[in-house]
């Protein structure tokens, strides 16, 4: 029997509930760190889904993009993404508005992003010669020594100095540390909130994700290596994107509780229809309404319990996988080098959660300004003209383009994005473009400098 102290000892047992990116990366990092200090611990990962399955059985309800910077960070950890995990490299964003379209090239080569499937593809897809991102990470955790248990955890409770985990099939076992990586769509979070007065689960909002089967050749012609994003005057819509992946295009709608009325307005927009062949939006073959974390759990830790990824704190609307990486590594480092008690997590893990939470507050300010642009046609003209002119420049700073790229991709913090919009040159250039783009004769039609077709055959 291991010593029941607030630190991990030889023989300590850790339960990781959830085998998505956060759970797999935590297991990988913890076992790697434990091995570095000659600490002999065991990790059980509870994950009932099999990510090699198509459709809901393997789906993790995600748009599925990974920034190049995260790919590089994972590589330094020994996690190198194989080619069959990446469905398509994204080299640009194409911004669609009612006043015109503009393609925004990657600011730097390291800011490219990769389109991935979290499972093994949509419900009605053919068997894929690809590997799911989540399945790949789970395999890496297993290679480090994690034991995957294909059971659904429905309850957990404190039993003396240990945590007891119970599953739907009445299986139960005791652990020295429990790591929650279930995301916010699990009922386990509701159970914990009912049990513990001091714990508040993350605030959530409903999103919409669907898949269109179009075919690789058509996607290459009409979408190319570009993610298509939309800045439309639709209330409560914060972000909308079409993401090419193999034979499919994924649509992701994020905002304030996506509902039928919002979706109808989006699908009725000509800017959306014009991206598809013949201006006709095909029927989707797979869809879901997952909920996402928009405010961190309070607190994201307890005595011998820690919440990571969407279960704890994550980026608002963007870069959820990046936040899973950061929280998983911080929680693993705390557990191995500091302790598994509430005080250790409060001192060494909570600061990261607060940092993410505070940056999300700035994110709400940034999206608030974005909503003003969505509602004001004159502002959209100015943004379009400024961005299009920057894309024609070779060496001059692309201030608006960089802001939009990082806002769409999540490659930079919201605080950094906001501070860049306060630069005098940025403000001056925006005011100039607002004025010129709305002069008589310019405001009547789409900006000819920025207007582009959706045909990407040249790529």
Image (tube, grey):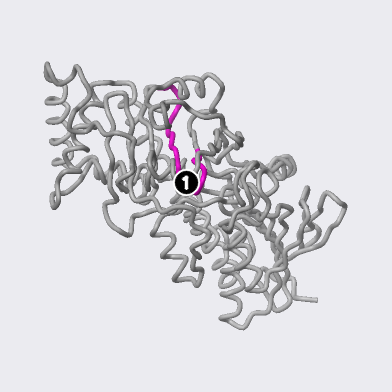
Q: Nearer the viewer, residue 93 or 257?
A: 93
**Which image quarter is the N terminus in?**
bottom right
User: How far from the left and from the top, in percent, is residue 259?
Assistant: 56, 24
Q: Is 56 situated above or below 143? A: above
Q: Quadrant of residue 403?
A: top left
Q: Is 27 situated above or below 58? A: below
User: How far from the left and from the top, in percent, is residue 442?
Assistant: 14, 21
Q: Is residue 130 left or right of residue 398?
A: right
Q: Is residue 188 left or right of residue 231?
A: right
Q: Identify the residue at horizontal 57%, vertical 48% (top origin).
A: 310
Residue 414, magenta (yes or no): no
Residue 21 visible to an observer of this rendering: no
Residue 373 visible to an observer of this rendering: yes
User: How far from the left and from the top, in percent, is residue 367?
Assistant: 37, 34
Q: Identify the residue at horizontal 57%, vertical 51% (top origin).
A: 118
Q: Is residue 253 left or right of residue 300?
A: left
Q: Which residues are magenta?
A: 234-250
* Magenta stretch: dominant secondary structure: strand
Q: Nearer the viewer, residue 207 or 310?
A: 207
- Read off the residue under disc 1: 216
Q: Is 340 situated above or below 48? A: below
Q: Please identify the residue farthest to the bottom as the structure is shown.
A: 38
Label 1 element class: helix
Q: Is residue 32 left or right of residue 382?
A: right
Residue 243, magenta (yes or no): yes
User: How far from the left and from the top, in percent, is residue 328?
Assistant: 55, 60
Q: Residues within 10 Å of mark 1 (few under 14, many from 20)?
A: some
């Amino acid at each position: 029997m291991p010593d029941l102290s607030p630190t991990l000892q030889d023989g300590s047992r850790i339960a990781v509930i959830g085998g998505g990116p956060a759970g797999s990366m935590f297991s990988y990092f913890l076992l790697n760190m434990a091995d570095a200090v000659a600490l002999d611990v065991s990790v059980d990962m509870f994950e009932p889904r099999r990510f090699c399955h198509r459709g809901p059985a393997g789906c993790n309800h995600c748009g599925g993009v990974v920034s190049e910077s995260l790919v590089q960070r994972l590589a330094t950890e020994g996690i190198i993404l194989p080619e069959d995990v990446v469905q398509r490299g994204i080299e640009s964003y194409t911004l669609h508005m009612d006043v015109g379209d503009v393609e925004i090239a990657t600011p730097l080569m390291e800011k490219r992003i990769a389109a991935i499937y979290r499972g093994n593809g949509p419900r009605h897809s053919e068997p894929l010669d690809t590997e799911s991102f989540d399945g790949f990470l789970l395999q890496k955790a297993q290679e480090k020594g994690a034991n995957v248990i294909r059971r659904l955890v429905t309850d957990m409770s404190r039993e003396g100095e240990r945590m007891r985990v119970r599953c739907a099939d009445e299986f139960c076992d005791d652990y020295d540390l429990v790591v929650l990586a279930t995301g916010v769509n699990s009922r386990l979070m509701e159970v914990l909130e009912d049990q513990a007065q001091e714990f508040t689960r993350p605030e959530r909002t409903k999103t919409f994700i669907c898949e269109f089967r179009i075919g690789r050749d058509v996607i290459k012609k009409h979408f190319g290596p570009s993610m298509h994003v939309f800045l439309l005057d639709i209330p409560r819509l914060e972000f909308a994107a079409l993401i090419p992946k193999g034979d499919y295009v994924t649509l992701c709608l994020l905002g304030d509780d996506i509902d039928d009325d919002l979706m109808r307005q989006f699908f009725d927009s000509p800017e959306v229809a014009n991206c598809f062949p013949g201006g006709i939006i095909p029927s989707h073959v797979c869809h879901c309404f997952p909920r996402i974390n928009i405010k961190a759990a309070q607190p994201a830790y307890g005595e011998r319990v820690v919440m990571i990824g969407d279960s704890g704190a994550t980026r608002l609307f963007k870069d959820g996988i990046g936040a899973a990486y950061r929280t998983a590594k911080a929680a693993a480092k705390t557990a191995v080098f500091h302790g598994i008690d509430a005080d250790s997590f409060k001192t060494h893990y909570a600061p990261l959660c607060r940092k993410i939470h505070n940056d999300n507050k700035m994110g709400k300010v940034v999206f608030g300004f974005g909503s003003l642009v969505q509602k004001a046609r004159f502002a959209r003209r100015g943004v379009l003209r400024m961005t299009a002119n920057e894309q024609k420049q070779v060496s001059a700073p692309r201030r608006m383009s960089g802001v939009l790229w990082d806002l769409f991709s999540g490659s930079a913090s919201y605080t950094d994005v906001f501070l860049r919009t306060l630069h005098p040159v940025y403000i001056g250039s925006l005011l100039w473009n607002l004025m010129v783009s709305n002069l008589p004769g310019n405001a009547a039609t789409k900006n000819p400098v920025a207007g582009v077709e959706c045909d990407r055959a040249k790529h």
